Image (spheres, grey):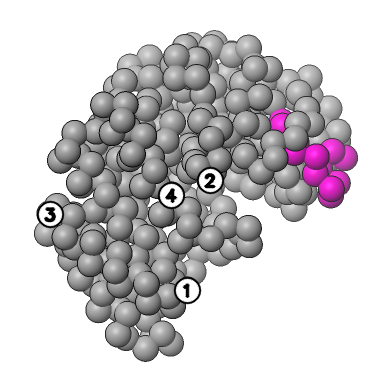
Amino acid sequence: MLSINKSLVSVIMPTYNQSAYIKEAISSVLSQSYSNLELIIIDNYSTDNTMEIVDSFFDKRIQYYKFRNHGVIASSRNFGFTKSHGEYIAFIDSDDVWESLKLEYQITHIQSVSCVSTNFKPIGDIDGFINYINSSLKDEYKDFEYDEVAQENPVITSSVLIRRDIFLQEKGFDENEAYKFIEDFELWLRVAYLGPIRILNEPLVQYRIYHKPNRDLRDVRIRILKIFDKHRNLGFLSVQQERKARGNCYISIGRSFQNVGDSQGITFYIKGLYFSYGFKNKLRAIAGLILFFIPKIIRPLVIRKAYQVYHLFS
């Protein structure tokens, strides 16, 4: 039975030159079955027709602001929060889409935890994309503890619903450029340190996959190691937790190098094999190393088959 909670939800949507997708994103928010919401759109001075698309919606729940974020999306989200009034805060990127019952389902869970995320359905360029979360969720939901989030971030920011007081307590997203493109992971880690993050098994978000030319995944994933440095200095990460987190991160870094045919990834896979815990993680590192010696033309097929086998034992 769904909750009768009617607290205001503030939905924050940062955007920049997303006219191809933003209309669908806005529509998915405004058509939520849980209608007591405000949609705060933070436009980083788009040069396309984003503003005209926003203006085409005659809905008093929309607030539209232009804000120069200088390439740091964390600052747009934090600015959006300063304009919000809701007891709960939700985020959606302007290229993603919500299912109509998303907020209604999440509201029934938010009383039990500080933050609720959901599973997702990938859309767009999904060829070869592996949805790790889908395979790990068997029940209606799973509560992810801090060390589980540190090992492999299961939180899609476009699916998050968080209590306002928690966001305030944690002072929002870290705007340090060292965490550019990974500032959401860093915040969800801090939130998870306060208590588990609940992830609903239902895929209530359509998460768009496509190549972002201004984003080198090798650099992004290497900088995740800086998050572990920060959390170690905060006293959040134990030695064993950090070792596990770094081991998984090294494997992820190795994969990003492998995807572009950069043999430096071999070094990271070796580090992942050394630092990671558990048979499955070590198997991932070994498989990554083997793939470097398989011809690139058949590598995607081998990867897909390998993950099918891997998930049979997950």
Which residue occupies 51% across, 24% down?
Answer: 172
Which residue occupies 34% across, 58% down?
Answer: 252
> Which marked residue is nearer to the observer: mark 2 or mark 3?
2
Residue with the most extreme left position:
279
> Which marked residue is nearer to the observer: mark 3 or mark 1?
1
Label 3 crowd bin: few (<14), some (14–19), many (20+), radius 10 Å: few
Left or right: 90 as drawn, with respect to 137:
right
Q: In which quadrant of the rendered image does the C terminus lie? A: bottom left
- Identify the secondary structure beneath mark 3: loop
Sequence-wise, the earlier of marks 4 and 2 is 2
50 falls in the magenta region? yes
| Closer to the camera in the image, 169 or 209 | 169
Residue linked to disc 1: 260
Would you identify the image quadrant in which residue 267 lies?
bottom left
Which residue occupies 53% across, 49% down?
Answer: 207
Q: CA distance from mark 3 to mark 1?
A: 27 Å
Left or right: 57 as drawn, with respect to 187:
right
Which residue occupies 30% across, 78% down?
Answer: 291
Would you identify the image quadrant in which residue 211 lies?
bottom right
Residue linked to disc 3: 278
Label 2 crowd bin: few (<14), some (14–19), many (20+), radius 10 Å: some
Q: Which residues are magenta?
A: 41-52
Residue linked to disc 4: 223
Residue 130 drawn at (x, y percent): 39, 61
Q: Amino acid at mark 2?
A: Phe
> Mark 4 touching mark 2, by CB under 8 A?
yes
